[in-house]
Amino acid sequence: MNMKAPRGTVDILPKDARKWQFVESKIKNICDKFNFEEIRTPLFEHTEVFQRGVGDSTDIVQKEMYTFEDRGGRSLTLRPEGTASVARAFVENKLFGDPNQPVKLYYFAQMFRYERPQKGRMRQLNQFGVEVLGSASPAVDAEVIDLAMSCYRELGLKSLKLVINSLGDNESRTNHRRALVEHFTPHKDELCKDCQTRLSQNPLRILDCKTDSDHPAMKTAPSILEFLNEESKNYFDQVKDYLTAMGIDYIVDKNLVRGLDYYNHTAFEIMSEAEGFGAITTLAGGGRYNGLVEELGGPATPGIGFGMGLERLLMALEAEKKEIPIDEALDCFLVAVGDEAEKEAVRLVHELRKNGIQVDKDYQGRKMKAQFKSADRNKAKYVLILGEDELQKQIINVKEMQTGEQVEIPLSQLAMTMQEKLQGGIENE
């Protein structure tokens, strides 16, 4: 019997979950500033959502999806990425009819991809992403990139590189595709099997191949930038102008294509240049997808978004030695000695919690000394001591652990007194 977590998955234990909560809270605050709203989509979709939305020629659809048949014979797939699901929800719930356009959405979601697990790349991964649906303005492209960069900067990351490219409109892509086929066809037998298939299905993705990355034909492959029509050039220039206006540095990489079929116009990736981060440097990636909503049965709706791996974000913070400020201290720990005091302790803990105070107590029947050790392990700011004598006098001893100062408080005033003490500690900090 195998009782370990499946390969490519990990348990996030409480001490690490606090870091995740801190990071997610920071990101949510940034989304609020940018006027983005949260969306939550199902963990699984009908398989055709990803086949049509992500593209049949992608590695995700061909090799990496967790697909199964339900009892009704329907083909379902665990979510491998977020954009297709959000676009499907946008169409199904008729968000295109919302008077507030564009619709600006963000999500935190678990994704599932069957690939070789390695550091920062798991089979079950956690992703933050945003999607803006309903605007074809290059200013929106710049805003989405700004939001992504703001998340990293707010958390203290400095060793970042933003890489951008344009994939052009349909006309530009068609002309570039033709040139790529002409360029790579003489070398077809020298390419890997995947690229031989891509040559007929989606030749642009040959440029993203890791297996053939050192092939001489890669270095001389025609760039999409050579085939941009006037409209696409102007669009890309505006995006770059907006980024410059916001003081966001970038590098144009003509070989940046992204791995999904739905991209056009702006594509971008954010990478970590921190020493010791690892060989896979990409932290986030995204771009514009003006035909995706139509592909999923909706009206013509331009869109742009990105996905950001949270595991990789935490790795980058570690590589740059950025400490996540986690307050592990407990407000109060209640030590009770004696059966009657134990009964009263249950009531007091309930009352304190109702008044917004973080408090815990012993549930193991430990002696007084052992309960104090529990308070120390919980890093309690105050220990509340209740014995039979205190209960008879209707008082409780309150000990401040940092100073050792101890005072008697009437039980009836405990909640109010602890609120004052804790509030005073916050103000002094």
Image: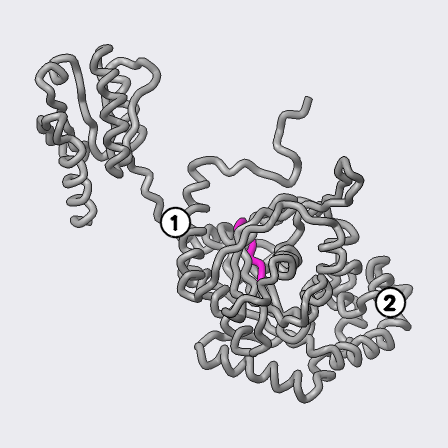
In the picture, residue 68 is in which quadrant? Answer: top right
Marks 1 and 2, how far apart at CA: 48 Å
Q: Which residue lies at the image location 62% right of the left edge and 29% below the top edge?
A: 4
User: Which residue position holds label 1?
Assistant: 324
- Residue occupying the point 53% across, 70% down: 102
- Check the image and report above or below for 30 versus 184: above
* Residue with the mark numbered 2: 200
Examine the rendering and report whether any part of residue 82 can be seen: yes
Q: Which mark is residue 271?
A: none
Location of residue 287 in the rendering, given as x and y in whole percent from the top left corner: 62, 68
The residue depicted at 18 percent of the width and 33 percent of the height is: 415
Residue 391, by quadrant, is: top left
Q: Name the residue type under label 2.
A: Ser
Region rendered in magenta: 306-311
Compare residues 411 and 129 and report the one nearer the observer: 411
- The amino acid beneath tag 1 is Ile
Give the residue at x 58% y 49%: 120
Secondary structure beneath dot 1 equals: loop
Q: Check disc 2 and report its element: helix, strand or loop.
A: helix
Front in this rendered view, residue 48 or 213: 48
| 221 left or right of 404 in image | right
The answer to which of 123 and 265 lies nearer the viewer is 265
Main SS class of the magenta portion in the image:
strand
Is residue 309 covered in magenta? yes
Q: Residue furthest top?
A: 339
